[in-house]
Image (spheres, helix red, strand yellow):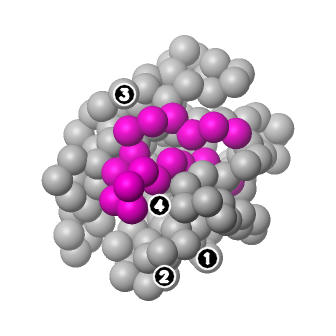
Amino acid sequence: MKVEENEEYDINKLDEPDESEDKRNLEKICVLNEEYDINKLDEPCESEDKRKLEEICVLNEEYDINKLDEPFEFENERKLEEICVLNEEYDINKLDEPDESANKIKLEEICVLNEEYDINKFDEPCEFENKRKLEEICVLNEEYDVNKLDKPCES
């Protein structure tokens, strides 16, 4: 698992695109945090290959922090309904069971580092049926509101 730090306090910005085993790249994920609905998404992400993920749905059992009310939209109309994510320090993003997407794609790893709070440090993979892997997701943190993402990541 690859973890990259952004030393200039763009805490969650990763410099390299995601690499999956099938060589697909999702370079940007835009996420909006609104009053602790940290992972509520209301704008589509844009990837270099113009693929679109219609839904990313993550449940936080304790706080419901990662429940997403609105989908990602991508041009190829593929849908990933769930992503399981582990937060080591606070267990905010820990899911007990693997996520299942409508098209049965499974993401083995999502790797994001938050330097200040380590909220997005994931050291255990998500498991999906087809064993595809996204090693990196670039996420932009602005103004130390760790999960408040209102701009796309830049790779």
- Residue 109 horizontal side relative to residue 40, left or right: right
Mark 2, residue position? 88
Element assignment for label 1:
loop
In 3D space, how far apart are the residues under numbered discs 3 and 2 (Cα atoms)? Answer: 28 Å
Q: What residue type is labelled 1?
A: Asp
Residue extending furthest toward the top: 75
In 3D space, how far apart are the residues under numbered discs 1 and 4 (Cα atoms)? Answer: 12 Å
**Of the image marks 3 and 4, the number of the one nearer the N terminus:** 3
Which mark, residue 48?
Answer: none
Taking the magenta stretch, the answer to whether it contains residue 91 is no
Q: What residue type is labelled 4?
A: Cys
Please tell me in which quadrant of the rendered image residue 48 appears: top right
In 3D space, how far apart are the residues under numbered discs 2 and 4 (Cα atoms)? Answer: 13 Å
Residue extending furthest toward the left: 35
Mark 3, residue position? 43
How crowded is the residue under tag 2: few (<14 C-alpha within 10 Å), some, or many (20+)? Answer: some
In 3D space, how far apart are the residues under numbered discs 3 and 1 (Cα atoms)? Answer: 28 Å
Q: In this view, does 136 lie above or below 114?
A: above
State which mark lies toward you, 1 or 4: 1
How crowded is the residue under tag 1: few (<14 C-alpha within 10 Å), some, or many (20+)? Answer: some
**Of the image marks 2 and 1, the number of the one nearer the N terminus:** 2
How crowded is the residue under tag 3: few (<14 C-alpha within 10 Å), some, or many (20+)? Answer: some
Mark 4, residue position? 84
Rendered location of residue 22, percent (x, y): 81, 39
